[in-house]
């Protein structure tokens, strides 16, 4: 039995007050039936938040991280928020009898600045159980193919990001659309992404993420569609960046050395 999908839109919009941006947003939210809208870097006066919510037909709106993240949602969802550090907002979403954990990331631009974010993500992973989705602007790529133009990406930046993903037991849900989610006209990078844990994969039969056209921002909107299957299944996920972790081969070797007892698979 399938229940209607739950659709999110997460976008580093860089200016939510512009009339053309609002028109583009209204079209996206209407066409894709977005029930949870998250805007990063709105660059607008907080006083305009309720008005924008009404224009976009949302009954609820709230601002976080000193106005860096705006969240809009309809009454089909019940949300409880927690600001964790200065780069992440965590929310517990109640929907059709299910409780979902969603973290929204607006990362700093430096490696040292992002270390606090990785620490917060690890705390979330240890503190909360159940389905967990992490989405937003991470300000870093995970491998060299995610950058084109300019100097090659910094290896230590990528290593710390991949170590954080590994430590949090998250996997990249994948995407359709263009590879790069940000450009300044000379450099293209995959900075915006969606990660999830195994419990999320077990809860949702389908989690589909699309990179939409950038519209009025230098970042692409992330459209996330999740189809809930009330008949639960267990799925296996493998994140390719795990192979780049410094402890990967040691973990594999240790696993192969574990004794296998007769009847363990019966």
Image (cartoon, rainbow, N blue to C red):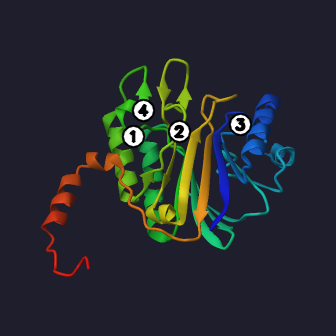
Front position in the image: 74 or 51: 74
- Earlier in the chain: of badge 3 and badge 1, it is 3
The residue pinned by badge 1 equals 142
Residue lying farthest to the bottom in this orientation:
263
User: Which residue is denoted by mark 2 in the rendering?
Assistant: 176
Disc 2 from disc 4: Cα separation: 14 Å
Q: Which mark is residue 146?
A: 4
Label 4 close to label 1 by CB (< 8 Å) = yes
Label 3–label 2 contact, CB within 8 A: no
N-terminal label among 3 and 2: 3
Are circles 1 and 2 on residues that touch, CB within 8 Å? Answer: no
- Residue occupying the point 42% across, 53% down: 171
On screen, residue 27 above or below 131? above
**What's the distance in space between the residues labelled 3 and 1, CA to CA?**
27 Å
Query: Helix, strand or loop at disc 2?
Result: loop
Residue at position x 21%, y 82% in the image: 263
> Which disc number belongs to residue 43?
3
């Amino acid at each position: 039995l399938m229940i209607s999908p739950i659709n999110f839109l997460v976008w580093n919009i860089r200016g939510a007050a512009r009339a053309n941006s609002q028109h583009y947003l209204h079209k996206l939210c209407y066409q894709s039936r977005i029930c949870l809208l998250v805007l990063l870097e709105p660059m607008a006066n907080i006083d305009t938040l309720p008005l924008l919510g009404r224009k976009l037909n949302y009954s609820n709106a709230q601002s976080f991280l000193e106005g860096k993240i705006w969240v809009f949602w309809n009454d089909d969802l019940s949300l409880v928020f927690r600001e964790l550090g200065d780069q992440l907002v965590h929310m517990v979403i109640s929907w059709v009898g299910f409780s979902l954990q969603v973290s929204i990331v607006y990362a700093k631009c430096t490696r040292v600045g992002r270390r606090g974010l990785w620490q917060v993500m690890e705390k979330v992973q240890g503190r909360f159980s159940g389905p967990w989705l992490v989405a937003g602007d991470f300000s870093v790529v995970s491998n060299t193919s995610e950058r084109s133009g300019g100097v090659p990406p910094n290896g230590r930046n990528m290593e710390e990001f991949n170590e954080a993903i590994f430590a949090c037991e998250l996997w990249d849900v994948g995407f359709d659309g263009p590879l790069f989610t940000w450009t300044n006209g000379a450099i293209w990078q995959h900075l915006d992404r969606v990660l999830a844990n195994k419990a999320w994969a077990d809860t949702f039969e389908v989690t589909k993420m699309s990179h939409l056209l950038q519209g009025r921002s230098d970042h692409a909107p992330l459209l996330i569609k999740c189809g809930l299957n009330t008949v639960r299944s267990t799925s296996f996920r493998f994140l390719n960046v795990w192979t780049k972790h410094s402890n990967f081969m040691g973990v594999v070797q240790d696993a192969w050395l574990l004794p296998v007892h007769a009847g363990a698979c019966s």
